[in-house]
Image (cartoon, grey):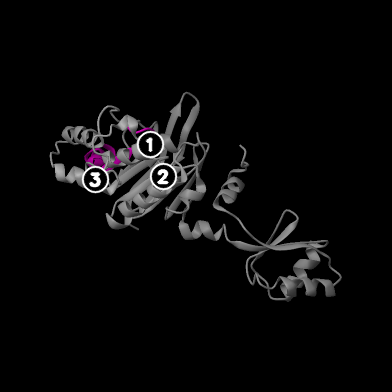
Amino acid sequence: MDYILTTNELTKTYGKYNAANEVSIHVERGGIYGLIGRNGAGKTTLMKMIGGLSHPTRGSFEIHGRNGETTKQMMPKVGILIEAPGLYPNMTAMQNLTTKAIALGIKDKQYLKGLLEEVGLSNTGKKKAKQFSLGMKQRLGIAMALVNKPELLILDEPINGLDPQGIAEMRSILHHLCYDKGITILISSHILDELSKVATQYGIIHEGRLLEEETKEELFSKCCERLELKTNNISKTLEVLNMMGFSKMEVKDDAINIYERLNEGGAITIALAKENIQTNEIAVKTDALEDYYFQLTGGNKNA
């Protein structure tokens, strides 16, 4: 597998508190890796260590297969936007971008204009950053993170606080940067539904620990449709289902979840009735990514 970034038990400790606890992630080149977690789960801490903004207490990470002191040589290939973008409020988008470019020794005005076009800010003219909407500020922050032509882009909660239009615009930009420009993206969010629309790989982090790391296909297979069946006798119901040839099923709480032949609810009900088994409830249900996350972390949606 071609990984652009890997971490090896990366840990950050403040006193006795582990903000990130032995986190090992594997980010494939050319995709969008989504870090899922609530506020305070450890996403930002992890990203700061990878971005060189915080020193790990323990563990290590590799970028392009390099670690330790050689990692520093790869940092120019990394673009970072963590928390609020550092903008000069009285400068225009181009002036902000130019200031960052000068610091990096870049003087190509056409290149900078192209970056503004990439993020949809080419027509802001003399409008100052302090007059920008939150979405515009985030997009300018991304443009500034792109100045050094990174191969890896680290974005911490870039859709947090955006309205639906702003979220849609950000989603379009991420797809463009990844699939048209070939930039690998590591993005964090607690808005799980939106993250599910862009990420190709996921790391679920909770209380500083990585709980699972999966591809989009693997994760979504756990959030798939199922036939939820409740009867007055689970053991006898399982016998009937086995006789009918069902094999992809599990008992969860007081229900049987069936993951195949979802259109055969009527036939199941008839077969159960013949065995004097009462069907209390039968319905096709789908778990959202958010439902799976809360199930995995043992939390609830109001936590």
Amino acid type for the residue under numbered disc 1: Ser
Q: Can you tell which mark lies on residue 115?
A: 3
Does dot 3 land on a helix, a strand or a loop?
A: helix
Left or right side of 264 for 123: left
Residue 252 visible in the shown view: yes
CB atoms at circles 2 and 1 under 8 Å apart? yes
Asked whether, in this view, residue 203 is left or right of residue 277, the answer is: left
- Disc with the residue nearer the chain's start (3 vs 1): 3
Which of the marked residues, 2 or 3, is nearer the chain's N terminus?
3
Left or right: residue 273 compared with residue 21: right
Of mark 2 and mark 1, the one earlier in the sequence is 1
* Image quarter in which the N terminus is found: bottom left
SS state under label 2: helix
Amino acid type for the residue under numbered disc 2: Gly
Real-space CA distance between mark 2 and mark 3, rounded to the nearest whole angstrom: 18 Å
In three-dimensional space, the C-alpha distance between marks 2 and 1, rounded to whole angstroms, equals 9 Å
The foreground one among 13 and 134 is 134
Residue 40 painted magenta: no
Q: Give the range drawn in magenta.
A: 68-86
Instruction: Find residue 204 and report its horizontal and vertical position in percent.
Output: 50, 46
**Percent position of residue 62, x then y:** 31, 44
On the image, numbered disc 2 is attached to which residue? 166
For label 1, the residue is 133
- Left or right: 139, with 24 as reference point: left
Residue 109, by quadrant, is top left
